[in-house]
Amino acid sequence: MGKISLQPNNDYCPQTLFLYGTYDEQGNPDFGLFCWFSYIWNEELGVMCCIGGSKLTKDNIKRSRVFSANLVTEELLPAADHLGCVSGSNPDKMKINLAIGKGAVLDVPVLEKSPVVFELEVIDIITKNDADIMLCKIRNVLQDESLSSDESVEQKLMRIAPVTTTANTYISHDGRSLGKWGEPMKQL
Ligand SMILES: Cc1cc2nc3c(=O)[nH]c(=O)nc-3n(C[C@H](O)[C@H](O)[C@H](O)COP(=O)(O)O)c2cc1C
């Protein structure tokens, strides 16, 4: 079968989803949903991510230089979809049922239900037009104790069920559609 040439897009390239946790100027937690997230090696493992446009998450990170990145699982998806579709400028955004704790090392809000949480410190920001590309140091990884069990990696992944996204669709770890963006939040 041949190939066709297309305009820039990343369909069929699944991306892992994270909820970024920050505090606003009043000290209230805010979470936003993000997928432009990957890793870098700079003497040790680090993180790079891109936040486009104007967002409360971006304002909060630029001010505090710290945030948490909480792995999104199927259990968290309805809330995650809401947090990705509703702007932090909406005063009702965070009025949903979320168990929020605190980072162990940094002053960042974390989600109790997320099995893997990175506590991140921004070491550099590259600004291009309205996009900010952030390079981050991983100050701590908060991981569920259950992930230290003797099960195989595959069994653990099936159990925690991380969600990926591509083509405006949420995909389960075992390959099922979990709905288009904006659909899972209707279950809240
Ligand atoms: C599935 C999904 C993935 C997203 N990924 C990103 C991303 O990687 N970068 C970005 O700038 N915005 C991304 N967004 C948009 C933000 O989540 C959205 O603007 C959110 O309202 C930001 O919340 P805040 O205003 O509280 O920061 C994504 C949205 C969805 C639904």
Image (cartoon, rainbow, N blue to C red):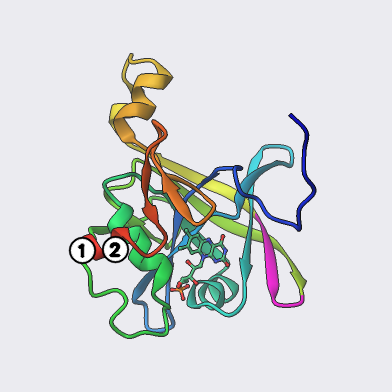
In the image, the segment drawn in magenta is 129-135
Look at the image and tell me in which quarter the C terminus lies.
Answer: bottom left
- What residue is pinned by disc 1? 188
- For the residue carrying disc 1, how many other residues have a C-alpha within 10 Å: few (<14), some (14-19), or many (20+)? few
Examine the rendered structure and indicate whether residue 85 appears above or below residue 103.
Answer: below
Q: Quadrant of residue 122?
A: bottom right
Q: Is residue 84 left or right of residue 101?
A: right
Q: Is residue 25 left or right of residue 166?
A: left
- For the residue carrying disc 2, how many other residues have a C-alpha within 10 Å: few (<14), some (14-19), or many (20+)? some
Q: Position of residue 184 (x, y in %)?
A: 30, 58
Q: Residue at x 41, y 78 (%)?
A: 88
Q: Residue at x 62, y 77 (%)?
A: 53
> Which secondary structure lies at badge 1?
loop
Q: Position of residue 133 (x, y in %)?
A: 69, 63
Q: Is residue 133 magenta?
A: yes
- What residue is pinned by disc 2? 185
Residue type (three-letter) at the residue carrying disc 1:
Leu
Q: Is residue 122 magenta?
A: no
Residue at the far front in the pictured view: 1
Q: Residue at x 58, y 57 (%)?
A: 121
In this orientation, which residue lies closer to the viewer: 187 or 148?
Answer: 187
Overall secondary structure of the magenta stretch? Answer: strand
